[in-house]
Image (spheres, helix red, strand yellow):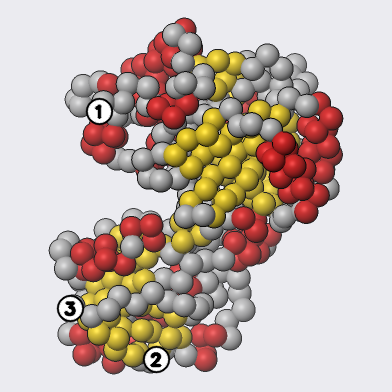
Amino acid sequence: MAIIRPFCGVRPSAEYAENIAALPYDVYNREEAVEEVKGKPYSFLRIDRAEVEMDMGIDTYDKKVYQHARDKFDEFVEKGYFIQDDKPCLYLYELEMNGRKQLGIVTCTSVDDYLNNNIKKHELTREAKEQDRINHVDYLDANTGPIFLTYRAEQEINTLMDKYVNDNTPIYDFTADDEISHRVWVVEDDKLIEQLVLHFKNIDSLYIADGHHRAASAVKVAMKRRKANPDYNGTEEFNFFLSVVFPDNQLHIMDYNRVVKDLNNYKVSELINEIEKNFVVEEIGSEPYKPTDKLEFGMFVEGKWYKLTAKDQLKSIDDPVSSLDVSILYDYLLQPILDIGDPRIDKRIDFVGGIRGLKELERRAQSDMKIAFSMYPTKIEELMNIADASKLMPPKSTWFEPKLRSGLFIHKLS
């Protein structure tokens, strides 16, 4: 059973929504964030990454940064850039990219569902990243970045959402600089809210698609609040966190590609001889190769593209993690041949989201790196099967597009 709950959302006034909406805080490093907010006085990054308004000598994780974030948030509220709905609502959020649409429900999900694994995870988190968002949530007394969740699609839920958006006018409707369109509807109708809540009680599990650190941080803040309020009854706002829940059949996962700094002292001919023990290697030439099926890989080295196809002995692997393309590449090429260690910390490997295109792989392999690998995208079913098995995916296995915007929905904890 999955719990979703309406909430009194804090959200931009309609005239400010397009200018407030920003990509998630962790898309940028500090220097990029500083550049991004130039000429954008309403950008939510000024709250999400408040250090952009402070001296570069101040540490990103200094408490002054979080206090400035709270002050900036209060300023946006006082000036009317943000408003709060008077009654608990659900919200429908549609993103459109290249003609593809995905429509989800903005809601609050349950801390207990997370703790009981009804909200399933597939990724490890890092303490430093968790602590940053714990501080941010604590100081603002609010969840400001929605957790991107998915579920196995139910037609009845899709029908209810589709009917509502067809019959009603969105409160926000804009196209961002990256040509992603964003539309939002406020659902105040108590009957529809009740129907959606009841339908989700028949959903066995929710799955974190993106936002593991935000989810873990929100839960840890909730546990702090529970400890500070031992008489809590479970209905308090801090027992729930901000989420957007999309049906799995509308999501789009792009390739998440790899680049490596050197050839581990191999010549290209020697490298190919080693690779041929487990892969069929076909020279493609100068034209970029984008894999068209599972267990196919592109390799770009010294100006040439190659197609790698896993041999039969690798196709018989049936473990949900070991059979992933990202695992096959690591277990039978990156680790044994190129000597890549833990990909979370090995500085000889880097990861390039598919949104950047294959030309970016070529650029990297001819500048700061030496060799690049193009991947076939992980499927959403693979992610869910791994989470169902209580296993973890390798790092950088999925790249979801389009990205949710921050600043359009805020959930106050008290």
Residue 126 vs residue 43, the one in the foreground: 43
Q: Is residue 159 left or right of residue 396?
A: right
Residue in view at x 61 percent, y 74 percent: 319
Q: How many marks?
A: 3
Circles 2 and 1: CB atoms closer than 8 Å: no
Mark nearer the N terminus (3 vs 2)? 2
Residue in view at x 37 percent, y 65 percent: 257
Mark 3 to mark 2 CA distance (whole Å): 19 Å
Q: Amino acid at mark 3?
A: Glu
Residue in view at x 50 percent, y 78 percent: 293
Residue 78 in the image: above or below residue 210 = above
Mark 2 to mark 1 CA distance (whole Å): 49 Å
Mark nearer the N terminus (2 vs 1)? 1
Q: Amino acid at mark 1?
A: Lys
Where disc 1 sits, the SS reads loop
Residue 140 vs residue 245, the one in the foreground: 245
Mark 1 to mark 3 CA distance (whole Å): 39 Å
Q: Which residue is mark 3?
A: 302
Residue 35 x, y percent position in the rendering: 24, 34
Where disc 3 sits, the SS reads loop
Callout 1 crowding tier (Cα within 10 Å): few <14, some 14–19, many ≥20:
few
Circles 1 and 3: CB atoms closer than 8 Å: no
Q: Which residue is mark 1?
A: 38
Q: Which residue is mark 2?
A: 280
Residue 169 vs residue 225, the one in the foreground: 169
Where disc 2 sits, the SS reads strand
Which quadrant would residue 107 be assigned to in this image? top right
Residue in view at x 36 percent, y 71 percent: 374
Which quadrant would residue 3 be assigned to in this image? top right
Residue 46 x, y percent position in the rendering: 35, 24
